[in-house]
Image (spheres, helix red, strand yellow):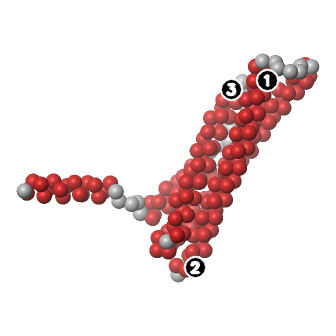
Amino acid sequence: MMVSVVGLLAVSVFTSRGTSEPTIETKVGYIVRDLKAIQALEPLQDASGRDWPQQAQVNLTRLKGHVEKAASIAGDLEPQLAAKSSGCIFVKHAVDKIDTEIPLAATATENALTVLLAGTKARQTSLKDENNALGWTGWRGSREEAISELTLLGHDVAITTANADLAFARLKNATGGLDKASAICQ
């Protein structure tokens, strides 16, 4: 009997530790950390070479991850607006810390996407100009494949740019709503 009581207590102690919700300060710290990580992404350097499309794709994949993270942060903030008690606690610890990081993260993402799109368009234009200078028309094998690849990459960058605009606007709106909620928390 004594062994089963001790066993139940031990199980409840270990399971309650694993299911505890992080503190508001911890959540805010995670959000600020994630926004700073988004800010730290360096745009792809405009280097010539055949491996540029592959490098651009890797960079774009990183940028997509950052956009998804911004949307996730917005999704985490939005429920805070629904409940006055949790919203007020969150407002006291979060809004000013998070609000200052959003424009920096949005600008870093926008700049990286702009550089990526400009590099893609420049390479595409260069290949098309070379085709015209050589008098080539129609399908020319690997050159046309490279142009098609760059067209698809440019399209993907444009879509990611639109998604980034939406994610950061949603994030800004969520922190704006929390900021407005601070008036009722006084």
Residue 136 in the figure: left or right of residue 102: right
Q: CA distance from mark 3 to mark 2?
A: 54 Å
Seen in the picture, residue 159 relative to 90 is either above or below; the reply is above
Seen in the picture, residue 25 relative to 44 is either above or below; the reply is below
Q: Between disc 3 and disc 2, whose residue precedes? A: 3
Tag 3 secondary structure? loop
Q: Which residue is mark 2?
A: 183
Towards the viewer: 146 or 108: 146
Quarter of the image where the N terminus is located: bottom left
User: Can I make out residue 5 in this image?
Assistant: yes
Q: Which residue is mark 1?
A: 144
Q: Nearer the viewer, mark 3 or mark 1?
A: 1
Residue 26 in the figure: left or right of residue 58: left
Q: Nearer the viewer, mark 2 or mark 1?
A: 1
Towards the viewer: 148 or 46: 148
Residue drawn at (67%, 59%) of the image: 169
Q: Which residue is mark 3?
A: 51
